[in-house]
Amino acid sequence: MKKSIFALMLILSVCFLSADIVINEIMYNAPSYDNEWVELYNNGTSVVNLTGWSFIDDDSTHIPVVFPEGYEIAPDGYFTIAIYHDSQAVPFPFTPDFDAMEICEWNLGNGSDGFLLYDDSNSLHDIVIYDDGNPWPTQADGSGPTLELISPELDNSLPESWQASAIDYGTPGAENTAGGELIYVNNLSELRAQEPGANIYCLTGEVVLTYKQTYRNQKYIQDDTAAILIDDNSGTITTEYNVNDGISMIQGNLSAYGGMLQFVPTADPGDATSSGNVIEPEIVTLNEFNNDFEEYEAELIKIENVAFDSLGIFENGTVYSITDATANSNFRTTFYDVDYIGTAIPDGQINFCGICNSRTDGEFITARNLADFEILGDIPVLTITPETLDFGVIEYGTLYEIDGVLSNIGTAELIIDSITYPSESFGISERIQLPIIIPVGASVNVTFTVLVEETDDINFEGVYLFEGNITAQELPANYTIETETADIVINEI
């Protein structure tokens, strides 16, 4: 009798465990590109191994997709399945836990269809037959939101257990928007530190509108701490704002798309709280932009002494390579039909302001209008290789050398007429003769040296300062190369 009771309890336990995996979110008709995916949720307390499980749509003539070994769902875990993607040019908007696009021979219908999940014994485990008409949430049919389960405790076969997600593209791999709470944050830095998901955030501090476009009613906002993109495809914000207006008490969800954090409003914040604000763009090098994009994401920045690597006419949605003295990066005409579309790409050195933005295919800078470009004319631009001088461990009385190159990648002849050294212990090619004249596109080989005597008083935090003669343009020409303190060590003899 005890054995029978134990067997019965074991069977009930296994069945209960199996029932904890629920179909939790469905993107069956995405806007723009048809990115179809389904999310499962483990509502239990144990890990569930998906090996041998399978899924299919509501067509028994289709071939089910079977999970191979190596896939599981942790307790309270989310598991995303990519089913279909109709664009070769644009990558899938996120990295799914299981990519079935290459093996799935069917896709989810944009009208009525279903998703059936079978366990490893081929028993039907969960099934959702959805529709794009009432009583099912119609906003999930191509408008941007997903079809999301209000709670994993509800019967997901019933249309009243589902809603359209409060944010476009849903919350793949995260809690659905139905279960959030209202959280107050003081500024954009605090907002950006939060996680995308169901919570609604109220931004109490004032932000300034730096750019807006009709596409998806998007707005870029910024304060002294950070910046963010407002993605308002549903048109929740009805108040009209001008660039440089101040806005307070914006409320919404956080989502991510194409690698970019987005603030999706859930209410209209009302009238502007100020106007005519001035945002001074932070001056950023391309090297800084490339290496720390998230620091500048959605921010209005300024790039100085930069040039487009090819000429032609600006076209919508096109990527253009740009170069400054520190690196190469990408300018993209992300904002459609702005006033510089159809005009000539600037020839020569420029300064320009732009919004930092990202997509699934990269990270970009985009000017807002023609006024963001400042044409400088022909100027020299000095680059120094290597950027950091690492002499390693050095000893008193020994000469150490590092080969380097001074290059002019600008559009005018460069004349270096003075060099400031960190100390008497450092040199360049044994105190190179000045002036150094470097034509456009040319380079000069140099040797950086260090020779330290025991009596030397040396400051290892000093810099090499090169002063170039470009008086014709009346522009500053100071270039520096630093020796890092940690890279230079003196061993006593």
Image: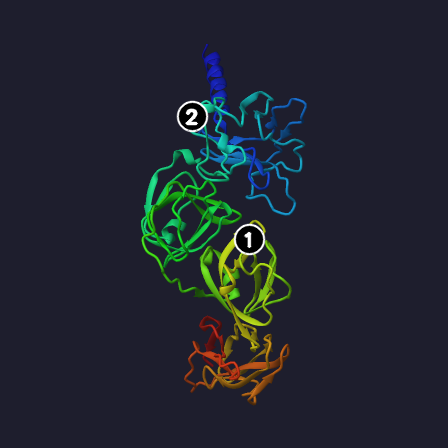
Q: Nearer the viewer, residue 334 or 363?
A: 334
Q: Is residue 108 above or below residue 206?
A: above
The answer to whether residue 54 of the structure is visible from this angle is yes
Number of numbered discs overlaid on the protein picture: 2
Q: On the image, numbered disc 2 is attached to which residue?
A: 153
Q: Is residue 106 above or below residue 329?
A: above
Q: Nearer the viewer, residue 157 or 230?
A: 230
- The percent position of residue 331, horizontal first and vertical second, equals 56, 60
Residue type, label 1: Tyr
- The percent position of residue 12, horizontal first and vertical second, equals 47, 18
Q: Which mark is residue 242?
A: none
Q: On the image, numbered disc 1 is attached to which residue?
A: 336
Q: Secondary structure at mark 2?
A: loop
Residue type, label 2: Glu
Relative side of 166 to 82, left or right: left
Q: Residue furthest bottom?
A: 433
Q: Residues within 10 Å of mark 2 (few under 14, many from 20)?
A: few
